[in-house]
Image (cartoon, rainbow, N blue to C red):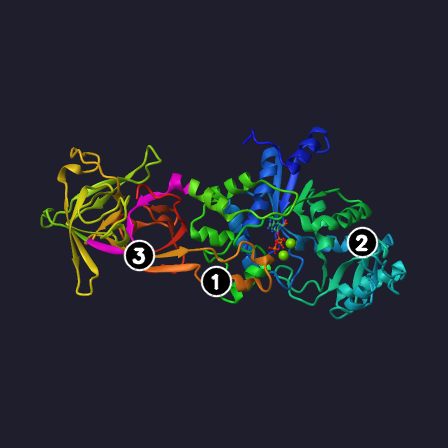
Amino acid sequence: SEEKSLNFIEEIIEADLKSGKYQSIVTRFPPEPNGYLHIGHATSICLNFGLSKRFGGYTNLRFDDTNPVTEETEYVESIKQDVAWLGFEWKNELYASDYFEQLYGFAVKLIEKGFAYVDDLSAEEIASLKGSHTEPGKDSPYRNRSIEENLRLFSEMRAGKYKDGEKVLRARIDMAHPNMLMRDPIIYRIKHAHHHRTGDAWCIYPMYDFAHGQSDSIEHVTHSICTLEFVPHRELYDWFIEKLEIFPSHQYEFARRNLTYTVMSKRKLLQLVNDKHVDGWDDPRMPTISGMRRRGYTPEAFRDFCDRVGIAKRENIVDVGLLEFCVREHLNKIALRRMVVFDPLKVVLTNYEEVLGEVEMLVGEDNPEDPNSATREIPFGRELYIERDDFMENPPKKFFRLFPGGMVRLKHAYIIKCDEVVKDEAGQITELRCTYIPESKSGNDTSGINVKGTLHWVSANNNVTAEVRLYDRLFKVEDPSSEEGDFKDYINPNSLDVVATVYAEPALKNARMDDRYQFLRKGYFTLDTKDTYGRLVFNRTVTLKDGWAK
Ligand code: ATP
Ligand code: MG
Ligand code: MG
């Protein structure tokens, strides 16, 4: 909101606008299309789009697709879907690969100015001459090639005359520079590989450092925001812009978003997918946007989460409980209330007379939080199901649910009293024989009876069955990446619990993908978007913090 104090990047932008350095700002969200977006990316998306919205200007979606080997069009499509779903509109859809010709031109310009050279050393030889933090590096024997020779070799590299790794183009900076990244970094490498957009047009590709800042500059990005690991790259970012004399974009860094009980690196997420620990990038246990969406998270919840957490200058790890809090807050406002019994115990109302061919329909509001809420009808009957664990034969004190001789209210229906417990030969309870109080109908209760407990229930003869999937954390420890050994050793083997058959009120027959549900006392649920052919499958988004009166 307007009242909130500015974060450090917002302060910089406000100062830049006040001083007249810029009239408006341009930001970008620059994913590499080599995986699906996760919650960390959502933070970056909310930040970049939030800034241009707040201060005036726009945000581009730019695919940083300069590495042909790992990138795929499938990822491009999923990224666009995820950004749009989060509720943001990019001004331009751009691809770093569209700048390959321009970037090549920039490299030629550097060569012409004596700021780049073709090196024939192998990757190992180059590394061995790099030096260390305490030792200066050594010049390559090819460092002083003439400009003409460099131009010829570089164009031959482009023409495909050399094999992978035979030559590279390096910036000519300083092999004794205190910043190791400034010790003549490689800016082009040969890779005879097919690119998802440029096909086989190129066999040389720019390195990240020679593509990212220049792409920012080409697009006149004013504030290029990235994560802290790029701090040491900033000097190189500025060096290229200065030597090429192009639009001066500026880089600012913030701490990556980390979350407890999960991992947030595309490389690790890909391992979970490939090793089949989860059933794809959009498995509801994954911290991906597509996984969380399938699980029932809402864009509002993500945006609220990003607002609340803000951004930091130092690495930290945020409690996943805060994200769960945000989604509960939102779902409480929008979820349709429904009654679903997971583990049924039959209740027979001995004094309830059913009329053949007639069903008593009760009325329940869809959402008590909403004053204009619609309602739905719930069939009642002589035979009902309640939750098995809502009954105890020998209850402890303060057990407000059902027990022999006790009374509870059935939500939206009547007060009932338990008269008799029926068991099978093994001693298992098979049925409760109860009486209902006809004057106690919800909304019209003249019975004068007060009960403490209210139970959800469904009619035993008018219900629909469904499958529910209950999710727990994917990892057993708060920060799997910082534990000893392989992060996969810390996977929670019980992160998925399937209840094959639950009994739901008939209104759920018409469940729709976009609807969110609260199964009373059970949590928030949404229809699964896959695996649902011919049947109802619900994913639990999150538990309810507090059920009502137990
Ligand atoms: P990963 O390590 O998961 O592969 P990445 O940084 O390589 O992530 P990119 O596709 O390059 O993934 O990320 C696009 C943008 O999102 C970058 O600006 C990056 O800094 C930002 N980003 C990625 N992960 C996080 C995170 N955990 N928190 C905040 N921002 C992130
Ligand atoms: Mg990256
Ligand atoms: Mg990466």
Q: CA gap, disc 2 to disc 3?
A: 61 Å
Query: Real-space Cα distance between discs 2 and 1?
Result: 41 Å
| Residue 473, horizontal then vertical, whole percent | 47, 55
* Image marks 2 and 3: residues in contact by CB distance under 8 Å: no
Judged from this view, the residue extending furthest toward the bottom is 163
Q: Give the numbered dot on residue 466.
A: 3
**In the displayed structure image, the side of residue 252 where residue 497 appears, left or right:** left
Pointer 2: what residue? Answer: 182
| Label 1 crowd bin: few (<14), some (14–19), many (20+), radius 10 Å | some
Q: Which residue sits at x=30%, y=56%?
A: 466
Q: Say which label, 2 or 1, has the lower sequence index.
A: 2
The residues bearing labels 1 and 3 have C-alpha atoms spaced at a distance of: 22 Å
Relative horizontal placement of residue 249, taking residue 1 as reference (left or right): right
At horizontal 85% and vertical 61% (from top left) the residue drawn is: 150
Residue 337 forms part of the magenta stretch: yes
Q: Which residue is mark 1?
A: 278
